[in-house]
């Protein structure tokens, strides 16, 4: 355990020391926030303004910050897993192989460091998001709500860390991994229904997006993050206005004729995480990192 601790600590320090890696992990977050401040937020506000009730700025800002929080659970672990690529490109991985460190401990150190880095950075985003919500006239979330959202965030970070760790085993160069990071940063806003509300997309596109773990993660986080604003604007979740809003802005997900509950979406994230963790273990047993 002492070896694992020091390896994890090493990976965290390497990541935080690389200012470019930290910046690019937040690049998608910065872009989304800038777009919403400039014009996307106003588009949603104008759409829901017809409700003629208080709390619309709170509703929209919570929707935005929930989306940004979800994006960071994807992009930050992606950046943190880059330590493995750097060690492989620099030949340091061979030095580890010649040491008495077990291969599974070495692999686990990269994965755990991605979890820790992801949680730290996402919490920074969360604090900034709560400050932004307050500025927009909203309220801080309660303790129970906070614990619930932290649980979902941790599961989301672990899920996407497992996925990117598995992909990293097939990537040998920094350029290839940078290309992957660029593609993910570009498309994550669309896959999560953040740049464009899912209700604005065609039915076939919606059907594809609804089965993706990104949609499940962002929906779970939105439901918790926006609970206070939803109660303020819609007076609960039973009104026709809320159902219309939820369907259009990704607070509800259906696959075919089945509407997914929060339990279904949470289970799908856990299954996704376990599947790619098992695939990683199998891959590790057959080849080098």
Image (cartoon, rainbow, N blue to C red):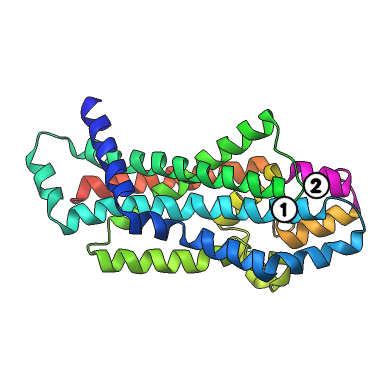
Q: Is 24 left or right of 219, judged from the image as shown?
A: left
Residue at 84% x, 53% y: name it.
Answer: 242
Residue at 52% x, 41% y: name it.
Answer: 123
Residue at 65% x, 40% y: name it.
Answer: 263
Q: Looking at the image, how many numbered discs can be counted on the residues?
A: 2
Asked if residue 261 can be seen in this view, the reply is no
Residue that numbered label 1 is attached to: 251
Q: Residues within 10 Å of mark 1 (few under 14, many from 20)?
A: many
| Residue 147 at x, y percent in the picture | 61, 31
Q: Secondary structure at mark 2?
A: helix
| Residue 282 at x, y percent in the picture | 29, 46
Quadrant in the picture for residue 256:
bottom right
The magenta-colored residue range is 226-239
Q: Residues within 10 Å of mark 2 (few under 14, many from 20)?
A: many
Of pointers 1 and 2, the one earlier in the residue sequence: 2
Answer above or below: position of 121 versus 245. Answer: above
Q: Residue furthest front?
A: 135
| Residue 101 at x, y percent in the picture | 15, 35
Q: Is 161 left or right of 263, judged from the image as shown?
A: left
Q: Residue furthest left?
A: 98
Q: Nearer the viewer, residue 193 or 24?
A: 24
Residue that numbered label 2 is attached to: 230
Q: Residue furthest top?
A: 1
Q: Distance from label 1 to label 2 (Cα)?
A: 11 Å
Asked if residue 90 can be seen in this view, the reply is yes
Q: Nearer the viewer, residue 19 or 176?
A: 19
Image quarter where the N terminus lies is top left
Q: Secondary structure at mark 1?
A: loop
Q: Is 228 left or right of 282, judged from the image as shown?
A: right
């Amino acid at each position: 355990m002492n070896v694992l601790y020091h390896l994890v600590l090493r990976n965290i320090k390497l990541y935080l020391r690389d200012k470019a890696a930290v910046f690019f992990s937040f690049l998608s977050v910065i872009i989304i926030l800038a777009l919403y401040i400039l014009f996307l937020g106003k588009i949603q506000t104008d759409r829901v303004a017809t409700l003629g009730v208080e709390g619309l700025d709170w509703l929209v800002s919570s929707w935005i910050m929930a989306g940004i929080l979800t994006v960071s659970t994807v992009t930050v672990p992606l950046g943190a897993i880059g330590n493995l690529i750097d060690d492989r490109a620099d030949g340091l991985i061979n030095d580890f192989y010649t040491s008495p460190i077990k291969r599974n401990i070495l692999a686990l150190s990269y994965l755990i460091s991605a979890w820790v880095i992801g949680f730290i950075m996402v919490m920074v985003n969360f604090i900034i998001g709560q400050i932004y919500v307050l500025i927009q006239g909203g309220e801080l979330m309660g303790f129970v709500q906070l614990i619930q959202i932290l649980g979902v965030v941790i599961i989301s970070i672990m899920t996407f860390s497992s996925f990117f760790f598995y992909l990293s085993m097939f990537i040998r160069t920094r350029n290839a991994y940078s290309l992957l990071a660029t593609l993910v940063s570009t498309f994550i806003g669309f896959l999560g229904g953040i740049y464009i509300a899912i209700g604005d997309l065609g039915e076939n596109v919606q059907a594809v997006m609804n089965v993706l773990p990104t949609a499940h993660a962002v929906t779970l986080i939105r439901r918790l993050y926006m609970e206070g604003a939803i109660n303020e604007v819609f007076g609960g979740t039973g009104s026709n206005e809320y159902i219309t809003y939820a369907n259009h802005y990704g607070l509800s997900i259906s696959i075919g004729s089945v509407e997914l509950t929060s339990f279904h979406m949470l289970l799908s994230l856990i299954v996704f995480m376990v599947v790619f963790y098992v695939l990683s273990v199998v891959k590790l047993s057959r080849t080098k990192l």
